[in-house]
Each structure stands twice: as structure tokens, then as C-alpha cells.
Image (tube, rainbow, N blue to C red):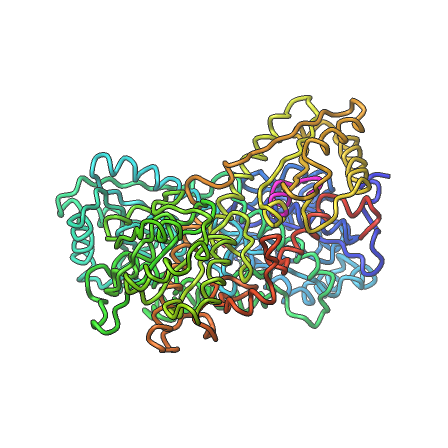
Amino acid sequence: DSVTARQTGSTPGTKKKIAVMTSGGDAPGMNPAVRAVVRAGIYYGCDVFAVYEGYEGLVKGGDLLRPIGWEDVRSYLSLGGTAIGTARCAEFRERAGRLQGAYNMIVNGIDALIVCGGDGSLTGADLFRSEWPSLVDELVSTRRLTAKQVEPYRHLTIVGLVGSIDNDMSSTDATIGAYSSLARITELVDYLDATAQSHSRAFVVEVMGRHCGWLGLMAGVATGADCIFIPERPPPADQWASELKKVCSRHREKGRRQTTVIIAEGAIDNQLNPITAENVKDVLVDLGLDTRITTLGHVQRGGTAVAYDRLLATQQGVDAVRAVLELTPADPSPMIGIAENKVVRRPLMEAVKFTKEVAKSIDARDFDRAMQLRDSTFAEAYHNYLATTLHDDGSQVLPADKRLTIGIVHVGASSSGLNAATRAAALYCISKGHRLLAIKNGFSGLIYDGGVHELQWIDVENWYNLGGSEIGTNRSLPSENFGAVAYQLQRHQLDGLIIVGGFESFTALHEMESERDNYPVFRMPMVVIPATVSNNVPGTEYSLGADTCLNQLTDYCDAVKQSASSSRRRVFVVEVQGGHSGYMASCCGLVTGAIATYTPEATVSLRTIQEDILLLHDVFANDKGEDHNGKIIVRNEQASSVYSTELIADIVREAADGRFETRTAIPGHVQQGFTPSSMDRVYAVRFAVQACRFIEASAWHDASVESSAPPAASSAVVLGIQGARLRFSPISSLYASDADVSLRKGKTIHWHEINDINDILSGRLLLRGGG
Ligand code: ATP
């Protein structure tokens, strides 16, 4: 009763033959996308074909267009590049090539095409669909096919998945591969930083992005670069060199030992003259800096996809299949995108059109429009970059009556984004003339030592890649001594407070808000920036540190799986942190292709374990010896009080009957730490600036200053991402409606979809007769 034996026809209804292809430049995450399409397609009862070598496979047909099965994509999650190949295909740009493509699809019975590629590939796909009726007519009129043969194929369903490292497609916040590329760049710039600091050197780092500055911008944000050059924001031709000198010497005068300039390959000035790495180097040399150029080149495409890209590609791949099944001929072809944390479908034609308009706007020197046409967070990230990096020149300092004193405190367990967020808040405050006071060692530090110090530029400038907490964190809460907390806040004349941390920071904010009548100083505006590997703070679907943790787990699980290579058939039961929140375990299961994921949100029973053992038997029985990796069961540490990690391993071992071995693998505290991921760094800056702006708006009673988020009804809020929006949620209502205090998590399980997808792609649901 195996998965492969029931690959087709398990779902009644419209059965489709779907072809999936990758096209254009390869991007990390393309393989996970193909895996998701193949398995979701099979799960929903479709036949799935792979088109090898991009559009070339469609044009040439034959062996380049063939069925692909469940087992064929088994190791795809951790594979970089694209295993089904990609190519630039000139023939497809011509009608004759597309006609041949249509012919090959029809003779293979294919009526839907899912294309994962960049704007060129999706332009081609869009054109293919718009021409389709005429291509079919031509095949009949030239007698290559009969009217009867083409009848079932009068309509072609096309769905676009955006796979590109550049993140250059409009209508989506992120493309598949962009965050992997950013991670690679960030990692490499970190390496350069170490040597730059040692020798007090300057580095000019050239990153990819001929027409799109997303990588350059985000790398600048994530690595605290002194200056960036991107095509969408060209500097004045006659001023950029002197501006560059000014900012670099200013930072050096403040004590910075290194200089980093990030330049996108397509950087230009406002007269559209290219600005090259050599040009930038000349300016820095002129400044007297020992300057080197590093062109990162193709390593930026590199390697295995980061966790976020695996998640994004998987969720979008499944949605692409669902779209194929749901679309009617009247619907425009969709492109699957992401808005903040929500997978969205957008009209493909529109997305392509907007993307092309960016290049046109740049050529027409309408740079503001070019910025607008990028995703919604692009302009925000640019402003955040300026606010935290360039505006330390005093040009943005507010009048004295607007300047504030803001406190920042870390609460709860350590995680990776705490310092990056604190740095960004401090730099933002300095640019505006506010003071950011760091409260040392959490609320107990405030209560017992009153330890507070003002953060200066040089204290924080290099905290962007520093894990842990420089100002100290612990789990103590204000209720330990409300009076002392109130006294200290009053003594330091705080106008607002930023609380960075996990569930304790949420509890701390609730406590202080509840005591506002007794301690009027608590009426100051207060914001929680969620930062915890458990991602268990009500009011947000994203917490700083969670992405770093997930990447640590991804690397750990990839390594553990591979340790079982050669002939050893092994199952690992991996124990993941998260307290009573199964978020991290669910995501870990998805990005590592776990056979089963046990979380507190679903009851683990003997029956579940039995069924999963059957699945394991099935998987090993179908392994034709090509997949040498171990299998994984992910178990959240609190998934069950009875079925411990050891016990599950023992049960599986006993039932394996010698057919495979079983081991436990417990990564422990590596999950909490180390260098923050590039995504956590970017979000740390975003959250910190948003939190400061919220405090400004509340303190000045000026709703217009607030931020991109809708106005909050309260001055004690949790900052977070909810679905497609960034929001400030009042603590009072969140606490009442969404907090599960005893289990230390929110009541809303925002990752249900991830669990559902896990069950589809592991084969669990198919084996249980779902689908
Ligand atoms: P990347 O973002 O990595 O550059 P891309 O998808 O934009 O990826 P392109 O080289 O522009 O990469 O396009 C890939 C393939 O898509 C081309 O080789 C061609 O086969 C097809 N294609 C691109 N543009 C068109 C078009 N206007 N009409 C038909 N086919 C096209």
C-alpha cells in the first residue's frame, strides 16, 4: 500500500497534467519549489511532468519533458541550484519555438504549466498563454494535430513562481532565492569585516543586481555598511564622491575601524553614468584609506537554500498547484507572491508590467517611481538604512522640545536579534537627537542596581552581527518590585520604553499597563519588539531570532541526515525547542522534509506513532538506493508528556525490526544563538525604527508620524507581523483575547498551514488515505 503505487487519481474532480519548470538564472529554493509542486500535484491527484533545461525542454520535448515522481524529488530540499536544469532559450523568444512548445505539451497531454523563474521567464510564460489559442489553431491549420486532438487543450493554465536571487519582481515582497543570496553576501561581508577591522581597511563589495538594488540595500542594512550604491537611488553625479568621503571620514572620526561600501553591479549616478567599484575605490584611496575591492560574483547564487527560501518555495509551490486546480479559463494567470507573511496570488501580467516599468522609470530618471514600484518594504528599508547609517550627521536632529529619552530593556532568554535591534534603535535615536538609555540586565537590573546608560554611536555601531545580549537579559518581571521600577523610570525621566524579548516581554508590558493607575509613569508609550526563538509572542507571526534558530536547525538536520549516508538506514528523532509552542518544530519539519512532526498543537498518540512507522517502512521500501540520507522525525520538547524523544526513538527502533536504525538528536542551546541571520538583522532594524517612531508619535500625540502600520488605539503595544501587515496591537486586548498564559504562547496558531503542508509533502496524508 505504498505512496508510489497510489500516485495518481487519489482525488476526485479535475485531474490535471501539470508540467513544472525552472528557467532563467538558477536560484536557491528552486528545488524545494519543484519538490512541493511534484508532491502536492500527486497528492491532489494530478500527473506531474518536469520540463528539463527551462524552455529548451519545452521546445525540444522528448526526454526533456517527462513524468516526475514522488521519490524523484526526495533530496531536493537541501539541494542548491536547480536539479531539473535551466537554460536561456533563444528559440522560445520566437513564435516558432513557442509553437513547438505547444505541440510538445499537447502530445504529452499537459494542460497546465508552472514556471519558476525571473521576470524574463514569467514574461515568456505570460506571452505563451496569451498566444495559446492561436498556437493551437495553427497546429490544427497546419495539420500537425487534429481538431479532436487539441479539443481538451483549448485552454492553458499558467502559474508563475518567482525564482530569482535579485528580488526584482514587483507585487511580491520576496522572490525565491533572494534571502539565500542575501545570507551568502552577509556571511561574506562579515568575513571581510573581521580583516577590515584588523587592518583598519576599507572594502568595496560589489553585489549582484543589474537593475535591482534589493540585495545591495538589504546587505547594507544587514552589515552596517557606511554607504551603498543602488540603481533605484542614484546619487547626484557631481556630489556623490564628496558625500562618500564625508560619511566615511565621519564614521572613522567617531571611532569605526573599518569602512564598508556595498555597490550593486547596476549602480549609477543621477545622470545615468555607471558608478563602478573602481570609481568608489578611487574616492576612498583619495581619502587615505587602504582600500580593496571584492566582487562576490557567482558565490551569491550559491549553495543550499536558507530556511526562509525553503519555506517560501514550499508554501508557494503547494499554492501554485492549488491555483492550477482552482482557476477557471476566465481567470488571469496568477503569480504566487508573498506579502509580509501571507502567500498571495497576483495577476502575472500586472506584476511583469510593473517590473518592466521600474527599468523604464530609471531610464527616464523618475527614481521616486522606481522606488514605489518595488515591493512595499523596499522604500521603508531604504529609509531605515538612511536613518541608522547616514543620518548621524546631525542633519535630522529634532528641535529640543521634540527630543525624547527612551529606555530599552531585554527580557527573557537570549536570542540572536537583540543586539541588532538595540543598535538600530540607538542609531535612529541619535540621528533624531533622542537619547536611548539601555537598562542593564533586565528588570531585576533596574530594580536592584538602577543600572542604566546612554548608548553612544560607537558603543553600538558594530552590533549588527553580534548574537546574544550586550546589555544583559533575564526573565525577571516588573512585578518583582513595581515601585522600584516606577521609581527608576521616573528618575531617568523616560518618555517611552522599548521591551525586547519573548513571552516575558509580553507579560512585562501587560503588568506595567495594568499598574498604570498606581504608577502613572507607566503611562508612557511602551512597545514590545518580539524576539524569541519560540516565536510565541501573541500579536506577531515573526519574532527576531526565530529565523536564525530555524537556520541553525536546518544546518543541523541536513548534517544529521547526511551522517546516515552510504548504506546506513537511519531514522533520527530530533528534539526542537519552543516550549509549548510548536512553531519552530513545524517549520523545522517543513524545511528539512521530516517524515513526521510532533507538536503540542496536535495530540501525539500511539496510533500516530504507529502510522508514522508504517510510513517509514514505506519510505525505506521505496528507496531504490539512490537516496542515502537518513530520515527525520521532529519532536517539539513539550509535544507530549508521555512520548518523550527517547521513548519515541525506542518505539520506532523496536518496530523497525532491524530494517533501519534509530537515534535521537538533540541540538539544545545551539538553537538560541550565534550570529543573527541576515533576515533577522533586516527585521531588527525595521522593528527598532518602527518602535521608535511609534513612541515618537504617542509621546507627541501626533498620529501622522506613526509609521506604515495603522494607528494603535493604545500606547502600550506589541509590534508584529500579522498576515500581510505590520501592526501595533494594544496589549490589553491581546492579553485578554490571545494570551495563553499558562502555556506561554498565543492562542492563535498562525502556522496551521505549515502543519497541513507538512502532512501532504511527507506522504503522511496520502498513506492515511487523504487527498
Ligand atoms: P533572472 O532573474 O535570473 O535573469 P529571468 O527569468 O529573468 O531570470 P531571462 O534570461 O530573462 O531570465 O529569461 C529566461 C528565458 O525565458 C529566456 O531564455 C527565454 O527562453 C524566456 N524569455 C524571456 N523573455 C521572453 C520573452 N519576452 N518572450 C518569450 N520568452 C522569453
Q: Give the vertical position of 78 relative to 732 (above or below).
A: above
Query: Does residue 489 show up magenta in the picture?
Result: no
Asked whether residue 468 is in view, the answer is yes
Q: Is 286 in front, or is 755?
A: 755
Q: Where is residue 593 in the image (x, y as percent from the top left)?
A: 65, 41
Q: Position of residue 410 (x, y in %)?
A: 40, 51
Q: Position of residue 546 (x, y in %)?
A: 51, 48
Q: Read off the magenta span.
A: 586-597
Q: In which quarter of the image is the N terminus?
A: top right
Q: In which quarter of the image is residue 644?
A: top right
Q: Quadrant of residue 368?
A: bottom left
Q: Is 111 in front, or is 514?
A: 514
- Point 55% across, 64% down: residue: 722
Q: Give the vertical position of 529 relative to 466 (above or below).
A: below
- Point 83% across, 39% down: residue: 2
Q: In which quarter of the image is residue 344?
A: bottom right
Asked whether residue 53 is in view, the answer is no
